[in-house]
Image (cartoon, rainbow, N blue to C red):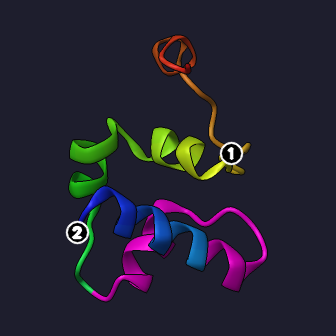
Amino acid sequence: MSKEEILATIKSCAEKLGRTPTCREVCETAAGKLDKGSIARKFGGYTRALAECGLKRQDKGRPRSAMEQSAQP
């Protein structure tokens, strides 16, 4: 999938759910055409792909490491 197709898939999934989707939900929506590795190769990670869509992660239950926090743009 191209970057544009991945972004469209994320946005479509967000509209259906009414919230920011998890990476797993996006990959399931793509019916095998997309995986976490593809997103990482194209964007550098799922969080960056969400940022390009204008979305933010919602999984506040998972503590973030110092390395993850410093990697944010």
Residue of label 2 = 1
Q: Residues within 10 Å of mark 2 (few under 14, many from 20)?
A: some
Q: Please say whether residue 27 is one of the residues in the magenta stretch.
A: yes
- Disc 2 or 1, which lies upstream in sequence? 2
Q: CA distance from mark 2 to mark 1?
A: 22 Å
Q: Is residue 34 left or right of residue 69?
A: left
Residue 5 lies, in percent from the top left, at 36, 69
Residue of label 1 = 56
Magenta-highlighted residues: 13-31
Q: Which mark is residue 18?
A: none
Q: Is residue 23 left or right of residue 2?
A: right
In this view, which residue lies farthest toward the right?
A: 18
Above/below status of 40 relative to 65: below
Image quadrant containing the N terminus: bottom left
- The three-letter amino acid code for the residue at tag 1 is Lys
- The three-letter amino acid code for the residue at tag 2 is Met
Seen from the viewer's position, the closer of residues 30 and 23 is 30
